[in-house]
Image: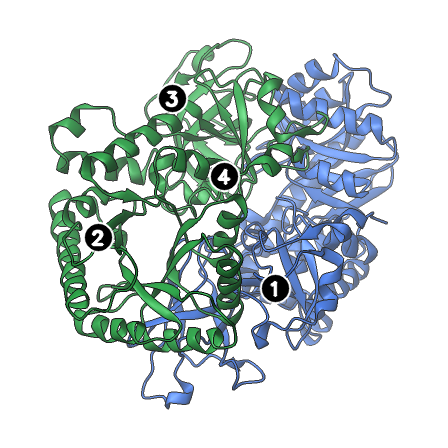
Chain colours: A green, B blue
Amino acid sequence: MLDLDSIDAEIVDARTKGFPPGVAPLPLAAIGAQRWNLLRGDLPFPQAVIKASALAHNHAWMRDFTAATGVLLAPHGKTTMAPQIFAQQLAAGAWGITVATVQQLGICVHFGVRRVIMANQLIGPREVTGVIRLREHHPDLEFHFLVDSVAQLAMIETIAAQHTMSRPLTALLELGVPGGRTGCRDGAEAVVVARAIAASPAVTLSGIECYEGLKVTGNSEEDAAVVGALMATIKSVALACDRADLFAGPAIILSAGGSAAFDIVARELPMQLSRPVQTILRSGCYVTHDSGFYARMLEGVKARSGAAWQTRPGLRPALEVWSRVQSRPETGLAILTMGKRDASFDIELPIAQTWLRPGLDVAPRPTPDGWKIEAMNDQHAYLRVPSGGAAAADELGVGDLVGCGISHPCTTFDKWRMLFTVDDAYRVTGAIRTFF
Amino acid sequence: MLDLDSIDAEIVDARTKGFPPGVAPLPLAAIGAQRWNLLRGDLPFPQAVIKASALAHNHAWMRDFTAATGVLLAPHGKTTMAPQIFAQQLAAGAWGITVATVQQLGICVHFGVRRVIMANQLIGPREVTGVIRLREHHPDLEFHFLVDSVAQLAMIETIAAQHTMSRPLTALLELGVPGGRTGCRDGAEAVVVARAIAASPAVTLSGIECYEGLKVTGNSEEDAAVVGALMATIKSVALACDRADLFAGPAIILSAGGSAAFDIVARELPMQLSRPVQTILRSGCYVTHDSGFYARMLEGVKARSGAAWQTRPGLRPALEVWSRVQSRPETGLAILTMGKRDASFDIELPIAQTWLRPGLDVAPRPTPDGWKIEAMNDQHAYLRVPSGGAAAADELGVGDLVGCGISHPCTTFDKWRMLFTVDDAYRVTGAIRTFF
């Protein structure tokens, strides 16, 4: 299990966004005992909070989904970059953690993760040297990175030749699609790269990887066809590599799967080869889910996954950003203490879901139809609130709190160095540290 | 001067994005002595770096501009949230620092800033209490925040009544514009709020504020008219408040000025009143400037500021994000190790300006026409590189480095906890810590 003692012991103070001003510094692990309540005004705003019940539900949901479909999970750690959440994911049965960079790998290893996939090309002398040192220092570290060109492989080999390695590096061949991101564009090119890896003095071929998420639109039938075709390509390349005996190691890894169409991957990717196959999903956003893009994508996952997954509760949005109305400068407009520094805006703007009048309401009320965040500046949000003759008690006022769901958790997490976890009554139960 | 010892002494290691993996932890102040060179491959990528010469130039430029125009400067600290840069700004003559939140105020006070404007409404019990405690704890702290409604003022008074204060809070009346953000929408409403502040048991009126930047388009004549009209409104409200004897304190603050049209503010806002007037600009982005939005806006500033400012060198872009080509998966496309986690994308995508082949080039080459970043994912950028039959040595290849200018420095700074400063040869001269 991970060693989170240094996080628990870290002294947090009001220099950290979200920590209440005027409160004495505290060890992070003592935050849950402070009995702070977001709705009662104990916290400054904005606040990004994680609903503990939804997070636990999502851990269990994905554990059940991967168990039912017989695949492994290396959740993408880039979403949260929170070792405390990594520990929960591993405790819920995750095989390992996925990362995007060598820095993120370093965070994982520092806290005790020992199975890591970097779903990205390893490139650069500092990065290659860093990986070699980490692996030599931690003989129990299993680390796979992507290779998609002979040029990249040659650069790794040049650096590796300057070091003594007790075991070779292990690489996943990346397949891509025309018009896509990284990855070999067709099977023939892929097999050329696979042969180069298999012949490398420094690197062995541990499996095949792709990322299907960029082509997913939410049209369930189209997504099934497009992702299915990509999985078929992976399997055909895997078979060719296996027949040519290019894989090394005790098992062959086949990995794909973001958070939008992981069900298709889980259904289509598993296959038999000459040695054991580990089919590994890398979904990251499932863990907090969201109230926008991934909420829509989940409908496709459920629709494709049969009655049992349609009737049971799906993933729940666990991440909310709360802010306070600082001004009602015109009819129909409220300005909130939240901006581009605080909440995702790359797919869509935050979604105003609930509001509360401090001192009057004991629980958040759902927002009326038509309330919509129309713009954000660095530190402000513009909430359009058509009044339509609401009574004064129902008119959003200066000082009221607004709770927003977000779309795309990754770009909210990276705006916070610490996020509070809350129970369903918005009592603070603890704090999560991020390492971006 | 500010006390930066705690920053200098902070031990940095590879858990911090940008720090080289495999290098032993170091005190931040020792980084400049490591003789790292970005171009030589000593650093991992991506890297956001600050060119020290451009930063120094911009400090001097703005010092000269404010001196020439006779205004004070409280640069917006939200841009960098870097006390080391605040110290440079104060050393270059800045009157104080502007912030957007009480957390940012706390950072300023922690490191020794004693004149702060919060260009935002003070609202919320924790925030008001935090401000009162800071002011009581630091009798030399001058702190002004915005008030734009009687409702907001009443909430502050309710909290303030629960505390013993040795001196009243000081507020700037905020003026806005119809269709704008915060701020009273007309002079009559503004005077009502000003009278309420003047009559408050807890708050005194220290001046008038507005933010003209949201209406600036880059059309120099239009901008001059729109911003000029807003300045005229401020002055008329200031005159009315002064005649009604609503201001308290030794001086009256008049403040406006982002980084796009600060010249108009400096020209139009100064005025005579019954007591000394402090005209304070709050420009933040000038300090690193940029290669996009503010670069375009500066053309208007220069055009409006007369021959002397047109002929001398203008602000220089000090912030660059460098990344490495990790894949050349298709003709005309390079994928870079940089994404939405690393560089601004809210106004426009990063601008590929220079590139370098490690081991071959000793200095960056300018990018050919047509190279353009077309998209970014969380951790990747898509650089379109029309080749047009370039020789192999001039074709961007896997492992090459690409230097990008950015548009809107605020949203690049907040993605980095530490940024290296570099000299003109990209040798690392030190590191800047941010507090977002």
Rounded to the nearest angstrom, the CA distance separating label 1 from label 3 is: 43 Å
Q: Which mark is residue B79?
A: none
Expressed as whole percent of the image width and height from the top left, the position of residue A367 reads 38, 21
Q: Quadrant location of residue A365?
A: top left
Q: Which mark is residue B49?
A: 1
Q: Which mark is residue A2?
A: 4
Rounded to the nearest angstrom, the CA distance separating label 2 from label 3 is: 52 Å
Mark 3 element type: loop
Rounded to the nearest angstrom, the CA distance separating label 1 from label 4 is: 33 Å
Q: In this rendering, is residue A230 above or below A16?
A: below
Closer to the camera in the image, B289 or B310: B289
Residue at (68%, 65%) from the top-left corner?
A: B305
| Label 1 in the same subunit as label 4 | no
Q: Quadrant location of residue B244?
A: top right
Q: In this rendering, is residue B419 above or below A287?
A: below
The numbered mark, 4 or 3, whose residue comes first in the sequence reads 4
Residue at (13%, 38%) from the top-left corner?
A: A304
Q: Amino acid at mark 1?
A: Val
Q: Which residue is mark 2?
A: A276
Mark 2 element type: loop
Q: Is residue A286 left or right of residue A216?
A: right
Chain ID at mark 2: A
Rounded to the nearest angstrom, the CA distance separating label 4 from label 3 is: 40 Å
Pair 2/1: label in front: 2
Closer to the camera in the image, A190 or B93: A190
Rounded to the nearest angstrom, the CA distance separating label 2 from label 4 is: 27 Å
Residue at (36%, 63%) from the top-left corner?
A: A170
Expressed as whole percent of the image width and height from the top left, the position of residue A103 reads 51, 56
Q: Amino acid at mark 3?
A: Thr
Q: Is mark 4 in CB contact (under 8 Å) with mark 3?
A: no
Rounded to the nearest angstrom, the CA distance separating label 2 from label 1 is: 46 Å
Q: Which residue is mark 3?
A: A367
